[in-house]
């Protein structure tokens, strides 16, 4: 089983340009997506995987950082103003911002960059749910799984693995719904 | 291999707050889209939405609550009331597989709260996964929870994964599968507006989502929840069976995050795989319930998918989209649309697609209009696609 786990502090530059074939996509990325592209690039170094490879990804619990949006929608009495929310907060928000919040975007951009067209799912948080997608899969080939977590301060962790069903059958953590990123952070897949 | 059946359903929707009301809304052609009432949309550039209603107006919910979680709670209450036998199933054999949208943040309270650091953000955010756990504890659903967040295919993946889980199991499990969603809040509604996907309709609000119509001009966000009870046929009370699920597949376009693959090829691949899994050939599909969002590109792409799957016959197969009535429920759309497919199977008719009036030559589909069409329906193909390029196909069968 090949595994990659990467972590980036809040001010660390994620070297996604080194891995991205289509550089124009970068403007759509949040840090978790960028880190995912890099991690999958490392995982697939020297390997060719079939476009039908199933891909399941688990997102960490969201920690919204909307400080700028929030500050721009307060009036002089520090009360929320619908008018300022629309005309100041969101006036300054890029149309691409929604793409940085949608939970399926790391999986989507990895699939675009690495030409993955097969079975897929995005799970919220749970390690056991992620691994059950593997066990229930109709496919007996190698499967790509991944997990990510973005913290409030914009530090980010991602982990990816290529594995087969039999490599996780019977593992005790299948009953445990802790955040999926911990599978990679604590190296549980090989224990 | 196990046969998988649907033995119960419940819905909270813009056209009805329980299954019976929803079914009545379907057959009456009730239009659920209007100007939003449930949240303050003053100064919004547009305020069309398909809200869950109380006394015919969009329901107002306390702003610290996540609307979609409230709808999930209501649908679970109805499910356990109307299918009381669920309480007799042992807790470790009951599972939740649910599709859900983004966590809700109470932006107004967060903004006004104070120093807006991490703790305040979390305090004003409703974590969807945690809410599902709370409901599970309340209703003794202890077998496991899975929350799928794959945007517009989240709930169809939840149902599809439940189908797979049951196919592979012999432990008598029962899975409550479905979805819940509301993007009718400040942050998410305006975020979607910024994407440029919302309907630009200037006429009567209830006509704003027009699947496959020549004058279609975008989607309208909807809200609600839909739940299905899935069991193996062996474990089910046969008298309760509403329909059978006999095929599921999911693919990815690997194209663009904002647009569907123009030739619809990967949605077609999902459809063909699901049909093959059902042990039938495409000629045996009697009706297709499409994703049908009301955007310009979706109709053309889905028409190409239909042609790839069905060949020349694609213009003869009656199709349907629910979104003209209930809007686009994003994470919950698949599950709610499966319930409308169940209605079609049970009543042997294809419903008219509401707000479809003028055919588009670029999307030459057989869209039923004005009144339901009676036909022999044994198999329905349900298709959905997501921003980001994920696709799902589910084959539903009349139970025999």
Image (cartoon, helix red, strand yellow):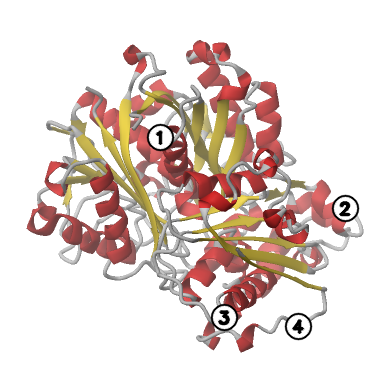
Tell me the CA gap for discs 3 and 4: 21 Å
Residue bearing mark 2 = B119
Does mark 1 fall on the same chain as mark 4?
Answer: no
Q: Which mark is residue A13?
A: 4
Tell me the CA gap for discs 4 and 1: 45 Å
Where residue B26 sits: x, y (%)? Answer: 32, 32
Q: Which mark is residue B167?
A: 1
User: Which of the pair B76/B320 is nearer the observer?
Assistant: B76
Position of B350 compared to B195: left or right?
Answer: left
Position of B52 compared to A89: left or right?
Answer: left
Residue bearing mark 3 = A45
Protein chain holding label 3: A
The answer to whether marks 3 and 1 mark residues whose Cβ atoms lie closer than 8 Å is: no
Protein chain holding label 4: A
Tell me the CA gap for discs 3 and 2: 39 Å
Protein chain holding label 2: B
Helix, strand or loop status at disc 1: helix
Protein chain holding label 1: B
Does mark 2 fall on the same chain as mark 4?
Answer: no
Write the residue at 50% across / 11% down. Answer: B85
């Amino acid at each position: 089983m090949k595994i990659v786990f990467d972590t980036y502090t809040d001010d660390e530059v994620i070297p996604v340009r080194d891995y991205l074939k289509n550089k124009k996509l970068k403007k759509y990325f949040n840090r978790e997506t960028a880190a995912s592209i890099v991690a999958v690039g490392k995982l697939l170094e020297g390997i060719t995987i079939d476009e039908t490879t199933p891909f399941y990804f688990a997102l960490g619990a969201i920690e919204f950082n909307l400080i700028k949006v929030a500050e721009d929608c307060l009036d002089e009495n520090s009360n929320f103003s619908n008018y300022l929310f629309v005309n100041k907060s969101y006036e300054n928000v890029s149309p691409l911002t929604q793409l940085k919040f949608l939970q399926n975007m790391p999986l989507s951009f990895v699939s675009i960059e690495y030409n993955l067209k097969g079975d897929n799912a995005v799970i919220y948080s749970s390690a056991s749910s992620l691994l059950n997608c593997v066990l229930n899969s109709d496919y007996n080939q190698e499967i790509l799984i991944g997990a990510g977590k973005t913290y409030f301060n914009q530090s980010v962790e991602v982990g990816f693995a290529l594995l087969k069903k039999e490599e996780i059958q019977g593992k005790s953590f299948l009953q445990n719904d802790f955040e999926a990123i911990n599978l990679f952070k604590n190296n549980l897949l090989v224990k | 291999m196990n046969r998988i059946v649907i033995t119960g359903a419940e819905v909270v929707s813009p056209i009805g707050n329980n299954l019976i009301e929803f079914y009545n809304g379907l057959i009456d052609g009730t239009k659920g889209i209007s100007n939003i009432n449930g949240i303050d949309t003053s100064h919004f550039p547009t305020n069309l939405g398909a809200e869950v209603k109380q006394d015919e107006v969009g329901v107002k919910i306390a702003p610290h609550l996540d609307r979609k979680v409230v709808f999930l709670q209501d649908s679970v209450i109805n499910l356990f009331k109307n299918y009381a036998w669920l309480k007799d199933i042992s807790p470790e054999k009951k599972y939740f597989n649910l599709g859900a949208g983004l966590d809700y943040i109470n932006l107004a309270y967060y903004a006004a709260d104070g120093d807006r650091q991490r703790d305040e953000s979390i305090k004003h955010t409703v974590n969807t996964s945690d809410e599902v756990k709370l409901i599970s504890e309340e209703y003794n659903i202890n077998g496991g929870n899975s929350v799928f967040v794959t945007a517009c295919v989240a709930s169809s993946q939840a149902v599809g994964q439940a189908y797979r889980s049951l196919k592979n199991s012999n432990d008598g499990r029962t899975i409550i599968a479905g979805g819940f969603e509301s993007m009718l809040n400040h942050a998410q509604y305006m975020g979607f507006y910024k994407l440029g996907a919302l309907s630009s309709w200037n006429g009567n609000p209830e006509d704003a989502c027009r699947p496959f119509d020549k004058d279609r001009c975008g989607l309208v966000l909807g809200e609600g929840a839909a739940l299905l009870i899935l069991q193996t046929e062996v474990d089910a009370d046969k008298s309760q069976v509403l329909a059978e699920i006999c095929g599921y597949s999911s693919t990815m376009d690997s194209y663009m995050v904002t647009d569907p693959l123009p030739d619809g090829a990967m949605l077609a691949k999902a459809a063909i795989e699901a049909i093959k899994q059902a042990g039938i050939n495409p000629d045996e599909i009697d009706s297709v319930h499409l994703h049908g969002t009301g955007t310009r590109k979706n109709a053309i792409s889905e028409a190409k998918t239909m042609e790839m799957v069905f060949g020349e016959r694609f213009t003869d197969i009656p199709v349907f989209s629910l979104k003209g009535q209930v809007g686009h429920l994003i994470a919950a759309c698949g599950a709610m649309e499966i319930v409308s497919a169940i209605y079609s199977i049970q009543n042997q008719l294809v419903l008219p697609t509401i707000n479809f009036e003028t055919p588009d030559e670029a999307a030459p589909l057989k869209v039923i209009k004005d009144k339901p069409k009676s036909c022999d329906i044994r198999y329905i193909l349900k298709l959905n696609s997501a921003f980001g390029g994920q696709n799902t196909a589910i084959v539903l069968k009349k139970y025999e």
